[in-house]
Amino acid sequence: MWTPPRIAATVLVLSLVAALGISSCSSGDEPHTSPPAVSSGGNAPPNRSGATRPAPPAPAAVLTLPPSVVDAELKAVSGAPIKLSSYSGKVLLVNLWATWCGPCKAETPELVKLNKEFRSQGVEVIGLSTEDPDDSEDDVRQFVHNFNVDYRVGWSGQKVAVALMQGRDAIPQSFIISRTGRIVKRFVGFNPSLTPGQIREALQEALNDKGAAD
């Protein structure tokens, strides 16, 4: 029976799940058109009509960055275009995000901290907005200013975003890439209690990669 103590315990458990859940947005959404999806565990996100859509079959994991990603010239907020092949020999943290995405906003200060912590060790943090470069240029520049982003920021473009996301369009997504181009870890969504520490561990793993050239 639903006694008062049992009801109180259930509410407490649900509150903890909500507090610790990993939140994300759908990269296909736009601001003010639909609320960001919140995922916890393996539940499929709701579609725009509110009904639950079945989760797509998981594609084969990509272990290294494909040439279409490495060699692409991506528009940058400042300076020359971003080309991941230019960072050969570096450990990379590549983050896919958008200005309107709440979890992306929550994650950005942590990325700034990680950049300050690991930059001297040979880690490069690169933020790539999944938004249209022409329509979002002012918003992205303002975002960089507001959050004091001191790592390189640009736009992924549709082809690079699709190649990296592998069928999962939730953002933010972060990829930790070793000096040899191996994808050490991929993070989908952001949990303020867990994700920063997990990214930190993955960066250290990439720096310690025995197959990496000095």
Image (spheres, rainbow, N blue to C red):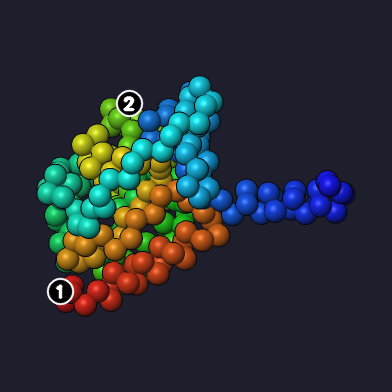
Q: Residue at x 53, y 48 (%)?
A: 40
Q: Amino acid at mark 1?
A: Ala
User: Where does residue 70 sit, x and y in percent of width and height?
Assistant: 15, 50
- In the picture provided, is 40 more to the left or to the right than 135? right
Q: Nearer the viewer, residue 16 or 110?
A: 16
Q: Amino acid at mark 2?
A: Asp
Which residue is denoted by mark 2 in the rendering? 135
User: Where does residue 82 sit, x and y in percent of width and height?
Assistant: 20, 47
- Image quadrant where residue 115 sits: bottom left
User: Where does residue 119 sit, x and y in percent of width and height?
Assistant: 32, 66
Q: Residue at x 35, y 53 (%)?
A: 174
**Secondary structure of residue under mark 1:** loop
Q: Which mark is residue 213?
A: 1
The mark nearer the N terminus, 2 or 1, is 2
Q: Is residue 138 above or below residue 102?
A: above
**Secondary structure of residue under mark 2:** helix
- Image quadrant where residue 56 sits: top left
Q: Residues within 10 Å of mark 1 (few under 14, many from 20)?
A: few
Q: Residue at x 59, y 54 (%)?
A: 20
